[in-house]
């Protein structure tokens, strides 16, 4: 079917070109007294085409709305999203009005005032009145749009996060997400990229993970040193290993310095989950974002929420879900419907498939689910090896250095 | 004000005439042809990745044929190659076609001719500008053949993705070549731009005051100013990136753990890169758009046989747009976690740009009102350009709104918006310019019937490709996605993608009508007269056969503005700028 369509379009195009060549040959026969200007017939024809196009363009628009309008995002599942949807609709009314009016004139005038050698155009150089009119009218409309838009923006981004908000960290890397809940103490534990290891994908800092990381680094140093003793004198290998050992030593010092941090135990009860996370309905959720490697962007279109995840920075966004997954399944009449977290900043080969399912549930169900999850201190149920994303890129195949 | 340099006839060899030419008319042709070649490459790339997007995961022999087993095994596009194609497509279209190609062609052709100068201020620098442009094009194309693939981080090449070869294969040698190419490109732009600015300021002929300049000159002049002020910032961004990639610095890097290793370099921020990039990036869209508006002004006025409406307001809006374009770059960064207050400021300044833009659109429409419209192919393209400028411009109001941007940032809505307002507008205007000034460039006429066919297929396909993409964006489909079949929520949209791809491929094939018409007419088109469209501007007072120094005798003297079309009391419906004002006659542009 598809190949057929392609072949069909190519054949049509070829035929069209062939046909045109014929016309072209015919006209170029008349060469010699060729006028550069269109003939009356051509002018008339193109003038009519203006209206045909105008009609076709508007029909296409209407058809697209009719055909695909229902497949756009369903109603907002977050509180602030309702404000945004209204704002968007308001913008649409103005925009579509302007679009239609200007297009009608843009294509109608050339049609109406098609060339006629017995007529002269109206020599009309400017009109201060008119120009003032179409400077001020857009200015007024824009002021309304600006005020309305900015008040929504201020409400969404500049309000205080409520005290009872649930804290969740969303942590991307090439190419998957991990969600971290704050646990019973409602505070996320410290974390640092120097702490990352197979068993600690987010680099959470707790007394236990510190000890473990230091041991890991030391084991590595020991291994490098034994390799070094076997490496030929003055070779490349020797240089490399010496450098690696120095690097690990510096990392160990860094990691050791974390022992002085306050609240080391805050991370003990943190909960890490992959591929799906739950949030309760009608509770404010405060998200924090970091990134392990490159810029990603956490995009949750059903909640009208997005924020970039930038290495070296912590960014934030919070919203309140108001429709559970089950309710939304009913509303959309789609028993398979799920809220989705996508990556929306180009981040490499599998950028197109970094997803996590979000489930909005009633508070009891949420509490029950959370209680069942293992805490960071209990050891993790998730580890890097279970990365769900297809590892397609070559860069992915660069094997993780095994940290024992 | 004229140069002392007059028409001396020295013997020209093939090399000095066609290759190392210092004549602005020849350099203009060089830019045009180079730009066209780049455009074809960019267009073929878009057709290739449209095959993947339209029919996801299907096998196409052509992909395998063109890209080989490594990048399209079994005829299925590799995701890394998809990103590489998108990246180079965007880079080529924005920089090589619509910056170098568009400004290079028309600033070179029109500035000296329309202001009454013998040539550019410096023919030599002008030649260098072309050769840097060619060099950068060659490097960019060469990067396609690198083992690990060309740059793939998107045309914006944000670090750390672009800074670390571990992050993606395209960030290896391909990215290095991208940076080399762009550095050469920036040098070319700066050399060209400085030359254009100096030429317009110093070499205007007698009587050619700033308020008698055609709008095309104003537009190209301000474009050059924008380029001179903003490209150095891109250069600094690129330079710091080169340092981060090759010399162990950390301007853009911090707290990174990649490919199983901790990176020790800390303290930088990728956001710094974004600021530097978009400080160029936003003016860049006007560097693309202003020449397009300038060309459109000339074509619409000439073919409506009517003065451009509100000449001074048009200049005012060009200046306003140019000024504002430097204080809106943050609208590309609303979602980077910037201070919300700053976001609000950028929303405000961005929406202000809508006002001068609206003025321009209304003035074009009023120019058509009670005109005497001749539908040359150039005129059709110019009308089409005003349509895309409006259709794409209005959605900018949505994207400028930081609150609304939360949900549509980086989706296909953005792709639809910028393709229509910048890509289509500039491409349509470039076609308008080529059809309109072809007789000036080559002394011959292009075929009109083919021009009509080319216009309608292109215009319909252009909307067919980009209009439906608004709907993808509103459904939440992110851009730069190799495939969206991994998400059941996008399954209902499959047919949009198919529709778009069909339009894209038909539209691409239709460009051969133009190619044929263009090259055929260069050699076999009917000879043109000196002023085929009955225009007022000075370029049409030069002889059909190009002469070095443009005018065989003395330079023309200008007596009036460029838009005395259908002036009451004149027998002809145009009055060239060289015709003296009659006793008591007011100059249209100056009069209030
Ligand atoms: C032949 C017609 C064209 C088609 C079919 C086409 C199609 C596309 C598509 C589908 C994308 C990828 C969107 C994504 O995955 O994010 C894209 C990206 C892009 N296109 Fe085009 N395009 C065309 C012409 C142009 C023109 C004339 C311009 C000039 C402004 C342009 C500039 C860009 C840019 C800047 C990007 C972004 C690249 C990036 O994401 O890094 N395109 N194009
Ligand atoms: Cu990502
Ligand atoms: Cu911008």
Image (cartoon, rainbow, N blue to C red):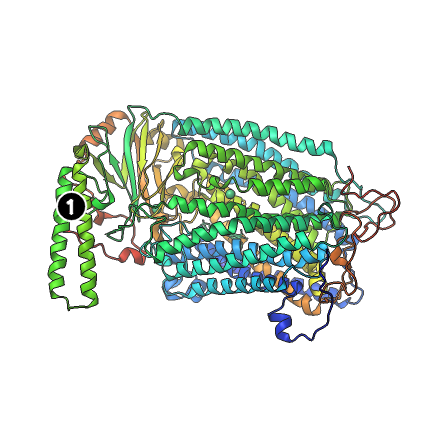
- Could you tell whether A212 is left or right of A389 in the image? left
Quadrant in which the N terminus of chain B is drawn: bottom right
Q: Residue at x 65, y 33 (%)?
A: A135
Instruction: Report whether residue B361 is seen.
Output: no
Q: Residue at x 56, y 28 (%)?
A: A143
Query: Residue A265, image x and y in percent?
Result: 16, 33
Mark 1 beta carbon near ligand 2 (under 8 Å):
no
Quadrant in which the C terminus of chain B is drawn: top right
The subunit carrying tag 1 is A
Query: Residue A396, image x and y in percent?
Result: 29, 55
Q: Nearer the viewer, residue B4 or B89?
A: B4
Q: Nearer the viewer, residue B197 or B352?
A: B197
- Could you tell whether B263 is left or right of B200 in the image? left
Which residue position holds label 1? A213
Q: Nearer the viewer, residue B382 or B94?
A: B94
Q: Nearer the viewer, residue B512 or A121?
A: A121
Name above or below for residue A164 compared with residue B501: above
Query: Residue B279, image x and y in percent?
Result: 49, 45
Question: Badge 1: few (under 14), some or many (20 or more) residues near its Cα, within 10 Å?
Answer: many
Name above or below for residue B265 compared with residue A3: above
- Could you tell whether A244 is left or right of B282 in the image? left
Q: Please tell me whether mark 1 sits on a helix, a strand or a loop.
A: helix
Query: Residue B216, image x and y in percent?
Result: 67, 50
Name above or below for residue B388 compared with residue A319: below
Q: Residue at x 72, y 33 (%)?
A: A130
| Residue B368 figure quarter | top right
- Could you tell whether B527 is left or right of B44 in the image? right
Instruction: Report whether residue B338 is seen.
Output: yes
Count up the numbered dots. 1
């Amino acid at each position: 079917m598809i190949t057929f369509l392609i072949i069909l379009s190519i054949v049509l195009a070829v035929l069209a070109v062939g046909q045109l060549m014929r016309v072209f040959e015919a006209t170029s026969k008349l060469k010699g007294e060729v006028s550069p200007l269109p003939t009356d017939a051509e002018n008339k024809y193109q003038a009519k085409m203006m209206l045909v196009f105008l009609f076709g363009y508007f029909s296409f628009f209407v058809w697209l709305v009719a055909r695909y309008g229902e497949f756009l995002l369903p109603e907002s599942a977050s509180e602030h999203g309702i404000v945004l949807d209204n704002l968007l609709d308001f913008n649409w009314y103005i925009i579509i009005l302007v679009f239609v009016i200007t297009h009608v004139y843009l294509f109608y005038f050339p049609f109406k005032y098609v060339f006629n050698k017995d007529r002269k155009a109206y020599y009309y150089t400017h009109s201060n009145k008119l120009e003032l009119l179409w400077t001020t009218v857009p200015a007024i409309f824009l002021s309304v749009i600006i005020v309305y838009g900015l008040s929504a923006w201020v409400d969404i981004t500049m309000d205080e996060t409520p005290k009872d908000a649930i804290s969740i960290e969303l942590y991307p890397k090439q190419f998957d997400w991990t969600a971290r809940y704050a646990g019973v103490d409602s505070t996320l534990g410290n974390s640092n990229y120097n702490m990352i290891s197979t068993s600690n994908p987010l680099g959470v800092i707790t007394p236990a993970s510190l000890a473990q990381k230091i041991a890991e680094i030391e084991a590595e140093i020991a291994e490098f040193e034994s390799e070094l003793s076997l490496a030929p004198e003055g070779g490349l290998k020797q240089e490399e290993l010496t450098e690696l050992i120095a690097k690990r030593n510096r990392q160990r010092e860094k990691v050791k310095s974390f022992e002085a941090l306050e609240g080391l135990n805050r991370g003990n009860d943190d909960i890490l989950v992959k591929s799906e996370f739950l949030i309760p309905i009608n509770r404010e959720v405060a998200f924090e974002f970091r990134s392990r490697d490159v810029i990603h962007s956490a995009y949750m279109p059903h909640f009208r929420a997005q924020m970039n995840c930038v290495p070296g920075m912590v960014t934030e966004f919070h919203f309140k879900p108001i429709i559970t997954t089950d309710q939304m399944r009913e509303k959309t009449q789609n028993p398979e419907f799920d809220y989705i977290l996508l990556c929306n900043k180009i981040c490499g080969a599998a950028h197109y498939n970094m997803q996590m399912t979000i489930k909005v549930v009633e508070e009891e169900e949420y509490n029950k689910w959370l209680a069942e999850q293992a805490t960071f201190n209990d050891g993790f149920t998730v580890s890097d090896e279970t990365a769900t994303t297809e590892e397609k890129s070559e860069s992915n195949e660069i094997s993780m250095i095994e940290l024992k | 004000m004229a140069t002392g340099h007059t028409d001396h006839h020295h013997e020209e060899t093939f090399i000095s005439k066609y290759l190392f030419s210092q004549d602005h008319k020849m350099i203009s042709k060089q830019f045009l042809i180079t730009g066209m070649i780049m455009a074809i490459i960019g267009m073929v790339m878009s057709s290739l990745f449209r095959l993947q997007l339209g029919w996801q995961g299907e096998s196409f022999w052509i992909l395998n044929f063109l890209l080989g087993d490594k990048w399209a095994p079994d005829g299925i596009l590799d995701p890394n190659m998809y990103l590489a194609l998108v990246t180079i497509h965007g880079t080529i279209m924005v920089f090589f076609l619509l910056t170098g190609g568009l400004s290079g062609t028309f600033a070179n052709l029109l500035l000296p001719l329309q202001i009454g100068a013998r040539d550019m201020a410096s023919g030599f620098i002008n030649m260098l500008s072309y050769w840097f442009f060619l060099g950068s094009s060659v490097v960019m194309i060469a990067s396609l053949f690198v083992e690990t693939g060309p740059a793939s981080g998107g045309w914006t090449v944000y670090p750390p993705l672009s800074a670390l070869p571990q992050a993606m294969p395209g960030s290896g040698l391909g990215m290095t070549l991208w940076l080399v190419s762009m550095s050469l490109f920036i040098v070319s732009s700066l050399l060209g731009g400085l030359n254009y600015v100096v030429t317009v300021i110093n070499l205007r002929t007698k009587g050619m005051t700033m308020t008698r300049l055609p709008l095309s000159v104003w537009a190209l002049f301000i474009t050059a100013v924008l380029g001179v002020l903003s490209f150095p910032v891109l250069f600094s961004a690129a330079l710091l990136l080169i340092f981060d990639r090759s010399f162990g610095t950390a301007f853009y890097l911090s707290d990174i753990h990649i490919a199983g290793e901790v990176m020790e370099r800390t303290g930088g921020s990728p956001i710094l890169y974004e600021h530097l990039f978009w400080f160029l990036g936003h003016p860049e869209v006007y560097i693309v758009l202003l020449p397009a508006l300038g060309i459109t002004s000339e074509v619409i006025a000439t073919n409506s046989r009517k003065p451009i409406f509100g000449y001074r307001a048009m200049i005012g809006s060009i200046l306003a747009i140019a000024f504002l374009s430097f204080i809106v770059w943050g609208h590309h960064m609303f979602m980077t976690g910037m201070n919300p207050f700053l976001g609000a400021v950028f929303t405000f300044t961005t929406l202000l740009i809508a006002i001068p833009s609206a003025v321009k659109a209304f003035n074009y429409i009023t120019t058509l009102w009670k005109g005497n419209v001749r539908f040359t192919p150039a005129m059709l393209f110019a009308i089409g350009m005003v349509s895309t400028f409006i259709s794409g411009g209005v959605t900018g109001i949505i994207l400028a709104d930081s609150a609304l941007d939360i949900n549509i940032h980086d989706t296909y809505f953005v792709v639809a918006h910028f393709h229509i307002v910048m890509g289509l507008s500039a491409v349509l205007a470039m076609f308008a310019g080529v059809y309109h000034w072809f007789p000036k460039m080559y002394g011959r006429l292009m075929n009109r019937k083919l021009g009509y066919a080319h216009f309608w297929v292109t215009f319909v396909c252009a909307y067919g490709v980009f209009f439906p993409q608004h709907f993808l964006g509103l459904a939440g489909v992110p851009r730069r996605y190799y495939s969206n079949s991994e998400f059941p929520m996008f399954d209902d949209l499959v047919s949009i993608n198919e529709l778009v791809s069909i339009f894209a491929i038909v539209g691409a094939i239709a460009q051969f009508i133009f190619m044929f018409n263009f090259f055929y007419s260069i050699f076999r088109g009917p000879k043109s007269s000196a002023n085929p469209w009955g225009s007022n501007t000075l370029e049409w007072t030069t002889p059909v056969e190009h002469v070095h120094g443009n005018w065989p005798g003395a330079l023309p003297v200008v007596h009036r503005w460029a838009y005395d079309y259908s002036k009451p009391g004149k027998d002809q419906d145009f009055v060239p700028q060289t015709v003296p004002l009659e006793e008591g006659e007011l100059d249209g542009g100056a009069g209030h």
